[in-house]
Image (tube, rainbow, N blue to C red):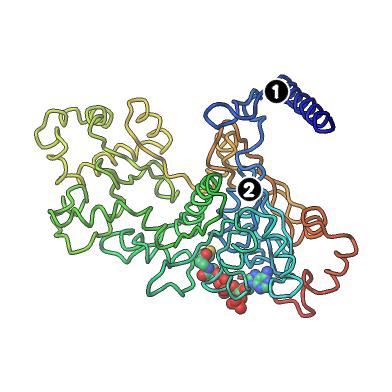
Amino acid sequence: MAIRKKAKKAKAKSKHASKKVVKLKSKKPAAKAGNGLPRPSSKPYGAAGKALDGIKILDFTHVQSGPTCTQLLAYMGADCIKVERPGVGDITRGQLRDVKGADSLYFTMLNGNKRSITIDSKHPKGKEILERLIKHCDVLVENFAPGALDRMGLTWDYIHKTNPRMIVASVKGFGPGPYEDCKVYENVAQCTGGAASTTGFREGPPLVTGAQIGDSGTGLHLAFGICAALYQRTRTGRGQKVFTAMQDGVLNLARVKLRDQQRLAHGPLTEYSQYGEGVAFGKAVPRAGNDSGGGQPGWILKCKGWETDPDAYIYFITQAPVWEAICDLIGKPEWKTDPDYAKPPARLPRLKAIFATIEEWTMTKTKFEVMDLCNAVDIPVGPILSMKEIAEEKSLRDTGTVVEVDHPTRGKYLTVGNPVKMSDSITEVKRSPLLGEHTDEILSKVLGYSAKDVEAIKASGAITPPDKPAKAEAA
Ligand code: CAO
């Protein structure tokens, strides 16, 4: 009898439970659709949060390469907790300072949308806080010199044991090999990644470029790897190491030059102007001045005002499909039928003279007039824009590519917003944090320390500068 009663009760319970489920289902649509993805959101685009909402980054980066990566992740919505050395912080806070006492533009333009906590990672209490952060976060990003993370005790084995889901992402100068222990800065990477040997003029020395392809370029590569690892984790449930060497990042961006290196084995590089000038090729890809990187010959030409304005130039591409339009525009209609000019192969040995003739025309116009006239007939050209012009360009402000933000100690400054525009993840650029601005907030609200604990941590010296604070380099 007792058993029967129990069974009846259980039946009633399960009936009740199944009713409950039905009720829930009818109230809310199922979270997952048939293909395992949530149902498409019905919210307006841009109102469904950001791409990386919920992702927590333990940001152990400094200088440029690592901060570029974490700033992008923060722009995408990740909560980026930047760990800095008490009293000093990221060395760039004090580098190339333009406003006395304020964080430099070097720092502020690479650390927007982040929170800053100061922790001495070598202090026992600091290690304890870091352990909590490792348990809390999804990704640790670092770009210390080789071995520095291990010397802090934060080895992959320790991190993986503490939080098996954590992704550990690193930038180093070189991958495994003879140079793996070397410290590397931007220009070292440009030189060792193949960019410098192929940049500049043939008769001059190798050149580095102003675009930070070693630092920011590698940071970008790392961000891509982190996003892929986060996606893979949704299947595997575990973290992994993500590693990008600056040499590799630069080479990836210079891959067309490795392409040309291999083409050299089969004859001269006919699109390089030295071919037209009759200069023999050596064993390695030469510097090609302002030759176009692709199969369409191009060069930088003077425009009106070049005598006084160092940026009064335009990049002009003699794209084959619009050759006839070029001839008409520059007043050389006879070139359209002249066998020496009509077809691309015939033009290759004459490029220098052709560009000199086009330049006679561009010098009569401003670079913006050339741009307008050429674009009207689909000729690809690009005015050389100075940083002043870029800073003042309205369309870049309108798209959020150049953004003005306000900072409590330096006032308003310009920064580069998210170059990746997403229709359902809208970037709001926020100022960089002051050193340790969020230390209390992170200790108490993120890591759950009580007010008493926070006081004890402060007294321990783990988050405050030592008596004699180390000096930030004022380069
Ligand atoms: N608490 C205590 N110690 C800390 C700390 C913290 N919060 N943050 C950093 N440190 C310590 C490190 O542990 C390290 O100490 P040890 O050498 O005793 O282990 C020390 O600070 C210096 O770190 P570092 O060697 O990385 O810094 P550096 O200024 O000497 O070198 C750089 C800078 C960029 C050359 C080097 O970090 C590097 O090669 N990084 C990898 C490549 C890279 O990203 N380069 C791009 C830089 S942007 O141009």
- State left or right for residue 137 relative to residue 377: right
Give the amino acid at mark 2. Answer: Ala
What's the residue at 61%, 64% (across, down)? Answer: 161
Total number of numbered labels?
2
Compared with residue 470, is residue 425 higher up or lower down, i.e. above or below? above
- At mark 1, the secondary structure is helix
| In the image, the residue with mark 2 has its CB under 8 Å from the nearest atom of ligand 1 | no
What residue would you read off at disc 2?
74
What's the residue at 49%, 51% (across, down)? Answer: 225
Q: In which quarter of the image is residue 204?
A: bottom left
Q: Which residue lies furthest to the right in this view?
A: 452
- Of the 4 image quadrants, the one containing the N terminus is top right
Q: Using the image as rendered, state which of residue 398 and residue 374 is in the foreground.
A: 398
- State left or right for residue 362 relative to residue 386: left
Q: Using the image as rendered, state which of residue 369 and residue 98 is in the foreground.
A: 98
- At mark 2, the secondary structure is helix
Q: Which residue lies furthest to the bottom in this view?
A: 468
Which percent across, then down, holds residue 396?
55, 38
Q: Residue furthest left?
A: 339
Q: Quadrant of residue 391?
A: top right
Give the amino acid at mark 1. Answer: Lys
- Label ID, residue 25: 1
Quadrant location of ligand 1? Answer: bottom right
Which percent across, then down, holds residue 224?
49, 49
Instruction: Look at discs 2 and 1 and give the one toward the viewer.
Output: 1
Residues at discs 2 and 1 in contact (Cβ within 8 Å): no
- Return the disc, 2 or 1, that comes first in the chain's sequence: 1
- Of the 4 image quadrants, the one containing the C terminus is bottom right
What's the residue at 26%, 27% (across, down)? Answer: 325
